[in-house]
Image (tube, helix red, strand yellow):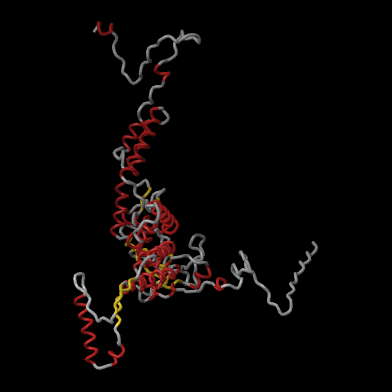
Amino acid sequence: MADTPAPAKRRIRVQAGSQPTFTADTYQNVVARLGVGTSNIHSGSTYGYNPISRNRMLLDFMYRGSWIVGKVVDVIAEDMTRAGIKITSTLDPKQIDAIHDGARNWAVWDQIAEGIKWSRLYGGCILVILIDGQNPSTRLNLNTISKGQFRGLLPLDRWMIQPSFTETVTDLGPDLGKPKFYDVTANAPAFQGERIHYSRVIRLEGVKLPYWQSQTEQFWGMSVVERLYDRLVAFDSTTTGAAQLVYKAYLRIYKVKGLREILGGPAAAQKGLMAQIDAIRAYQSAEGMTLMDAEDEMEALTYSFGGLSDILARFEEQIAGAADIPLVRMFGQSPAGFSTGEADLRNHYDGINSQQNSRLRPGVKRVYELLCRSELDIDVPDGFGIEFEPLWQLSAKEKAEIAETHTRTVLSAELQNTVSHATALKELKAQSEETGVWTNITDDDVTEAENEPPPLSETDINPPGPDETDAGSAPTRLPAKDPRVPDLPTAGERANG
């Protein structure tokens, strides 16, 4: 195969004494100096590097001293763990209740919420799965867990542990390339100096970073506070400035002739001036009057706060957007316009559910499988799964409307013989979890309906007669005997005893 000749290089000639003009891939008007790269002030804009995720003390002070930072960190964590989960399994309802009781007794959801908070504040955290009697540096084997061995979770933030940089996970899966072990530091609340295997932890990260950036953060993510830091400073500066303006909202100015001479003169003159000011304060009221010299002047200056509320509202919107939390949840206020915030809350809850499934589901399912063995001392059955409970709760009116519509649809289908009576009962029972209606339908009712004989068809009721022809109307026929009705004696049989 012949070698492909290299493309010829283009030469750009620049006139001697002139400077080359650099342009960017955007709209530009060099004559009007519009756009980036046209020698205007806007072209000097750029982005700096402020990695406050590495400044633990600053993050601690911000979390303790700023209610906005506290909300940004806590709201998402509390929403992700507030409703809990629903177990989907063939287990008996009493067994499922026992698993939920075990989760409450060991404060599983409280510890998960705490782990999410510190991962959002510091950029990373792990939840150590506490198994009694096992070495934490070994791989966790579900089949080795017996009754009573699960003891809850222990949150350890990124500053309490040291990931193994040289030993990473080589097994194919979601943990590939992540640290294989976590060495606990001496200032941790437990497991000081011990090594924990990655299979025994639930790893949580704040804002996920690109690979090379995560390397600079010791395999962790970024604090959620870092992205909104500049907006937070702008908001706090504005609110603090507005608070200080209140002290200057009403200023009174009193002009005294020869004030310099009085202040630089004898003490008696200064004392007389202060006595005059005190007299003005004493008599200046709603029913009094102002006493002053005929050559003195007094005026009042008032400050108008018009427009300041609009500026604060814009900063609030920017913080809510940077934190990905709606205004109604962040600041407790509805957005501007005709919106009540309901749609914003629904979108927020949808986003929470997405994060639950992408970040929490594998770890939470593992914990509940451990609870199944620890609380019930049985193997995890096939089909064992979890579903996060929805955060949006229907009102009583909405539940009633949904129940009425669903019930009417199911009964209509049954009357038209589209579905059987047993199927109709199953459909009504299935909707009870959402609406709370038809909760008394049991599995026995469904089984009894399945064992019932099928309903009579039109052919069974009116079978075709022998004299029926295509022409004219069919002769009247007696209904066919229902096989479910027992045979009765005829009149002759009754007369003969």
Q: State the image coordinates of residue 231 (x, y, percent, origin top left).
A: 43, 68
Snapshot quadrant of residue 256: bottom left
Q: Quadrant of the N terminus?
A: bottom right
Snapshot quadrant of residue 139: bottom left
Q: State the image coordinates of residue 276 (x, y, percent, origin top left).
A: 22, 83
What residue sits 30% from the left and 91% below the top? 261
Q: Quadrant of the C terminus?
A: top left
What residue sits 34% from the left and 72% below the top? 245
Q: Nearer the viewer, residue 267 or 208?
A: 267
Q: Nearer the viewer, residue 352 or 20?
A: 20
Q: Is residue 135 visible?
A: no
Q: Is residue 93 above or below residue 164?
A: above
Q: Is residue 447 above or below residue 33?
A: above
Lateral position of residue 455 relative to residue 259, left or right? right
| Residue closest to the far bottom | 266
Lateral position of residue 3 relative to residue 399, left or right? right
How many numbered circles are shown? 0
Q: Nearer the viewer, residue 318 or 449?
A: 318
Q: Is residue 418 above or below residue 222?
A: above
Snapshot quadrant of residue 7: bottom right
Q: Is residue 299 above or below residue 384?
A: below
Lateral position of residue 295 relative to residue 465, left or right? left
Q: State the image coordinates of residue 218 (x, y, percent, origin top left).
A: 47, 72
Q: Nearer the viewer, residue 283 or 326?
A: 283
